[in-house]
Structures are given as structure tokens and as C-alpha cells.
């Protein structure tokens, strides 16, 4: 017996069930996980960018200066210095 929710298209319900099966989860578990992920995304919409822009730098100040110097030299030698 197939159960359908009101105002949920049959195709969407089938896809939902298929996704739950693909993740080896029961429908209730899968729905709970989706709701939690959705809430987290609403709370932290730019969390990825905050991690990238405000996170710990992977370069030391010394390394960053060396890269800037190398870039400036490259730009002068190739005529890209404006």
C-alpha cells in the first residue's frame, strides 16, 4: 500500500523515498536529517565563506610577502605592471 501526503506530488514522493533508500535511511530518519541540515543552512548561510575569509591563514606573513615580491617581479618582467 502506497501512502501519499496531501499536496505532495507523486513524483516528489517517489524521489524522496528513492533518496532515503540511496542513503540507507528510513523515511523518518531521512526527513529528520533534511530538516536539521535545512535549519543549519538557514542559521549559517555564509558559514563556508566565513571559514575561508575569517579562518586561520595557511600562509605566514613572511611567505605572503615573498609571493607579493615574486608577483611584482613577474609583472615588471612581463609588462603587466600597468
Image: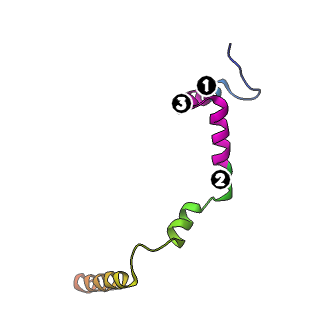
Distance of mark 3 from mark 2, alpha carbons?
Answer: 22 Å
Look at the image and tell me in which quarter the C terminus lies. bottom left
Q: Is residue 68 above or below residue 54?
A: below
Q: In the image, is residue 30 part of the stretch drawn in magenta?
A: yes
The answer to which image quadrant residue 74 occupies is bottom left
Q: Is residue 33 above or below residue 7?
A: below
Q: In the image, is residue 2 part of the stretch drawn in magenta?
A: no
Point 50% across, 67% down: residue: 52
Q: Which type of secondary structure does the marked residue at label 3 adopt?
A: loop
| Rendered location of residue 12, percent (x, y) | 63, 29
Residue position for label 1: 14
Look at discs 3 and 1 and give the one toward the viewer: 3
Q: Which type of secondary structure does the marked residue at label 2 adopt?
A: helix
| Rendered location of residue 6, percent (x, y) | 77, 26
- Mark before the other along the chain sequence, 3 or 1: 1
Look at discs 1 and 2 and give the one toward the viewer: 2
- Mark before the other along the chain sequence, 3 or 2: 3
| Rendered location of residue 54, percent (x, y) | 54, 72
The answer to which image quadrant residue 44 occupies is bottom right
Span colored in magenta: 15-38
Q: Is residue 38 above or below residue 43?
A: above
Q: How many numbered marks are there?
A: 3
Point 53% across, 33% down: residue: 23
Checking the image for residue 62, the label placed there is none
Checking the image for residue 40, the label placed there is 2
Look at discs 3 and 2 and give the one toward the viewer: 3
Checking the image for residue 24, the label placed there is 3
Q: Which type of secondary structure does the marked residue at label 1 adopt?
A: helix
Residue 45 is left or right of residue 49, and the answer is right
Residue 78 is left or right of residue 2, and the answer is left
Q: Main secondary structure of the magenta part?
A: helix
Amino acid at each position: 500500500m502506497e501512502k501519499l501526503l496531501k499536496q505532495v506530488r507523486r513524483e516528489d514522493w517517489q524521489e524522496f523515498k528513492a533518496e532515503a533508500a540511496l542513503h540507507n535511511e528510513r523515511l523518518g530518519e531521512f526527513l529528520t536529517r533534511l530538516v536539521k541540515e535545512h535549519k543549519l543552512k538557514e542559521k549559517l548561510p555564509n558559514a563556508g565563506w566565513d571559514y575561508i575569509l575569517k579562518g586561520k591563514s595557511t600562509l605566514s606573513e613572511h611567505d605572503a610577502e615573498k609571493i607579493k615580491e615574486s608577483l611584482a617581479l613577474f609583472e615588471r618582467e612581463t609588462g603587466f605592471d600597468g
